Image (cartoon, rainbow, N blue to C red):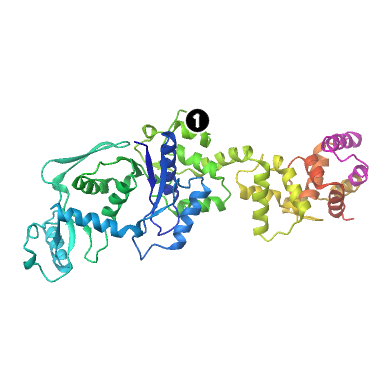
Amino acid sequence: MSVRTRFAPSPTGYLHIGGARTALFNYLFARRHGGQYLLRIEDTDKQRSTQEAVEQIIESLAWLGLSPDEAPVFQSQREARHAEVARELLAAGRAYLAYDTQEELAAMRAAAEASKRPFKYDGSRWIGMDPAQAPDIAPVIRIRAPQGGEMLVADLVQGEVRVAHAELDDMIILRSDGTPTYLHAVVVDDHDMAITHVIRGDDHLTNTFRQCMVYDAMGWHRPKFAHIPLIHGADGAKLSKRHGAVGALEFREQGFLPEAVCNYLMRLGWGHGDEEVIPRDKAMQLFDLDGVGRAASRMDYAKLTHLNGVYLRAADDARLAEEVLRRLAKRGVLFGTDGARRVEMLMPALKERAKTVEELTGSAAFAVHEGPVPMDAKAAAALTPEAKERLKDLAVFLQDAPWERSDLEHWLRDYAEVKQVKLGTVAQPLRAALTGSLQSPPIDAVLFALGREEAMDRILAAAGE
């Protein structure tokens, strides 16, 4: 049987980074075994589910390169099928109608609490009841929990997990209004979608035993389960916004590359020797569930940022330039074709220092300006009267220089040698004049990208000419 996995988020908010890792593990496992990876939107909570969240989830997965192999399945569109299965169980005697009122259920819970024992629903009075004796209220359908013994789940991450049948109660599978409960709908959907492996967070582990009641009662083959540990903050607490970005698209806005995020998430709780940089094609060959640990992982933003820098340096220059220009335009920075060309020319040097695309955008902004650039405080302080005189002299010296990068480097070195000054004495005021900062790509690269006319305009403006 071909491997089929699924990612099944609820559209009640953004795609959390933990959900993104779950999707990634499902995707990689399916690819590793030549199978399919699917998406199911579990939107049965009609009050909290929104179309905006659905669109955001799909956009997040697309950005991460985790779009499903088939069109998404929407759980809310399958309620008739969920009800059909519930009625099959009812007809087979594996489920029954229960007519408890909310007040009666509240009284049962209160009695359990008073006795200091866990609440366990007992619907024995409804089993085998003559329909003519039924109360005049809409009933729910409850599945009959197995009696005696225990249930075993051989989890692919957690190992063998057992629970006594005595701890399971007769859960509701169809509400009195005819809508299915989540735990029932999930089983029906996974069965109908031919899911072979359910890979999800270990916060769902306790749900698995209750869901297995439905599989077993229907005589359906259970999928294999793999419950992966959650992601915590560096302090060991549940990951939240106080730790930093937690939504997948937040990382995009902060300038992280999707391949870096996926690489980091894959290594967060899964190990393969000491390798840290594992591209997608290699990840699809290596990933398997036996490498997933049982302990919760801790989000390390510094490590992710470092890894993002590695991927930035390897990224295509044209792709990065396009993204930088998009971000500059979003900031309201106006530029023409010359500015766009300069950014792409400088990208090989710009990306060597940057850790994020957002940082890269800030360092590239000087290239799209026409004429004098804004100065940061350190650059302005470097333009002393002596430095300005140096710039005037340099303008004369460079006026007749051949405008090729290799020639410009030699000319600047020759100038420093002739004037008997250190190259830094020449380069720093020149860097301030050209970029508005004391940190930039190599000065010969900047001169070459700006072109003679633009470079001269900036040098003379900074010199006060």
- For this rendering, which residue is in front, 415 or 257? 257
Residue 117 in picture, x, y percent from top left: 13, 54
Image quadrant containing the C terminus: bottom right
Examine the rendered structure and indicate whether residue 154 appears above or below residue 437.
Answer: above
Identify the image quadrant of residue 223.
top left
- For this rendering, which residue is in front, 78 or 10? 78
Q: Mark 1 points at which residue?
A: 275
**Is residue 440 magenta-colored?**
no
Q: Which residue occupies 82% across, 45% down?
A: 430
Left or right of 462 on screen, residue 192: left
Residue 307 in picture, x, y percent from top left: 55, 39
Q: Residues within 10 Å of mark 1 (few under 14, many from 20)?
A: few
Q: Can residue 24 be seen in this view?
A: yes
Q: Kindly state the secondary structure of the residue where label 1 is placed.
A: loop
Q: Which residue occupies 68% across, 47% down?
A: 321
- For this rendering, which residue is in front, 388 or 248? 248
Q: Is residue 436 visible?
A: no
Left or right of 342 on screen, residue 314: left
* Predominant SS along the magenta part: helix
Read off the magenta span: 394-420
Left or right of 374 on screen, residue 64: left
